[in-house]
Structures are given as structure tokens and as C-alpha cells.
Image: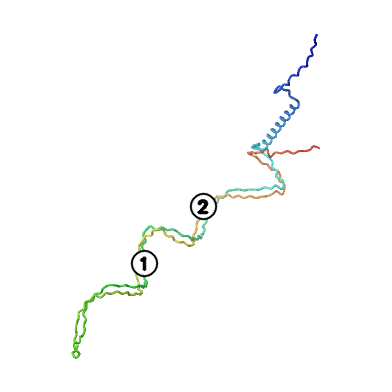
Amino acid sequence: MSTQTLAPSAPPPAPGGWNRPVTRRALLLVSLLTALLWLALVVAGFFYVRREWVTVLEMRDQPVQLRLPEGLAARAEVAEPVLTHLESTQRLRLPLNQEVRVQVQNNLKAHTVIDTVVPVHTVVNFEGDIPVDTTVSAEVPVVSWWPSFPVTIPVKVVVPVKVAVPVSAQIPLALALDVSGELAGPLRVPIKTVLDTQVVLRANVRAQVSSSTDFSLLSPVEPFGVDIRHARFQLPMSDFGWTMVSGR
């Protein structure tokens, strides 16, 4: 009879993927990461709400008691319209120093009188032929012992003449003329004067008088009542805070 030895069987393979067992260490790590993520979301939400959220509080017909402490710095402002009637006469002196452009549309007519002396300095050039037609009387002797007898000789010649005559004279000139004309462009008239005038002012005046005064209270003021008809308060969360009080 033969004896056979059985070999031990191999252990089954460990499951993998989603079927593998979860260890305690992995479960603790996932829980810690989840808690940290939740804490970060809570902190971020708290800071966002603290920065962006504004609380609105409305009060209507609410009587309150107001007390002002000593040393309070305050400012009082007063604004009130003032109605008055202005009636006055003011004297004004207006200096003018400028050029004015004047356009003349019509023709200009004027009467002028000229009484002056015109100096003349020139040279008159003359070139031409001068005809000469005359009679020359003379006494012609015949012989020495015979007395001379008068003779009349007709002379008719043409004499060429070319001369330059200097002329220097003072010619008196007296004229009375009527002048008319038309101006093509505008005239530039300089004006330099001082206008002394009076201006009458009559008007209804409405003015807004406003003043402000800064002051500080030297002593506390007794509480006084104030009725709030309607008030709307906006309180941002960023203005809220907290203090730590240690217990004794």
C-alpha cells in the first residue's frame, strides 16, 4: 500500500480595488481631511459674511432719551433762507482801453481847405525849332565920305534850340475841395477813456445763509427726549467685535 503526502494549498489572493478592506489608519486620515475641509469652509464663510453682510434696522415713532457726555466734540450747523429787496444806485467807473472795428457802409463826403506852399525844384528840358520872322533895321555906309542910309531887311529863319533850364520856386497853393470816397475795409478805432456812470439796482434777493460752529461740552447734559419719526440704520458686520472676559 502506497502512502501519498499532501502539499499545503496556497493562500487565496488579497482582494483589490473597491473590494480591498479599509484599514483603520486610512479611515482616520479621511476623517481628518474631511474635518479640515469643513473647518476651512466655515472660516471662509464667516469672514465673507463679516465683510459683506449689512444689518438694516428701521425705527418708526420711537421715543428715546439722549444724553451727551462731558467733553463731547460736536458741530452745530444752521441753514436758513433770507428774503430781501435790493434797491440801490451804484456809481461805476469803467476804464476802457481797446480797439474797436468799425465798418462804414455809406460813402464818405467831406469838404477840405488846403492852404500851403509847395516847393518846386526841377529841371525843364526843351528841344525844338523856333521860327523867327522879323524885320531888321540897320544903317549901311556906302563910302567914307557919303553918309550912311537906313536899310530895312526882312529876316525869316528857323532856329534849332536844345536847352535845360533849372527851376527852383515856392508856389503858394490854396484850394477848397469837396472829397468823397468809400472805405473798402473796416476801421480800427482805438478807444481809451473812463466811463463814469450810475447803475440802478432793483431786485428781489433770496440768499441761503449757512453757518457752522465747532464746540465741546464743558459739563454733561441732562438726558432729554427725542422722538424718532423714521430712522434707518445700517450696521455692517465688520463693526461688530467681541471681548474676552476672564472669570474670577
Q: Amino acid at mark 1?
A: Thr
Left or right, residue 207 beside residue 147? right
Between residue 84 and residue 190, name the one nearer to us.
Answer: 190
> Which residue sits at x=51%, y=52%?
203
Residue 171: x and y in percent read 35, 73
Q: Quadrant of residue 20?
A: top right
Left or right, residue 226 beside residue 208? right
- Indicate whether 75 appears above or below 59: below
> Disc 1 on helix, strand or loop?
strand
Left or right, residue 27 beside residue 176? right
Q: Which residue is mark 1?
A: 112
> Which residue sits at x=36%, y=67%?
112
Between residue 170 and residue 242, name the one nearer to us.
Answer: 170
Name the quarter where the C terminus is drawn: top right
Between residue 32 and residue 69, name the one nearer to us.
Answer: 32
- Crowd class of label 1 (few under 14; some 14 to 19; many from 20; radius 10 Å): few
Residue 10: x and y in percent read 76, 18
- Residue 203, numbered label: 2
Of labels 1 and 2, earlier in sequence is 1
Residue 17: x and y in percent read 70, 23
- Crowd class of label 2 (few under 14; some 14 to 19; many from 20; radius 10 Å): few
Q: Amino acid at mark 2?
A: Ala
Q: Quadrant of residue 109?
A: bottom left
Between residue 119 and residue 201, name the one nearer to us.
Answer: 119
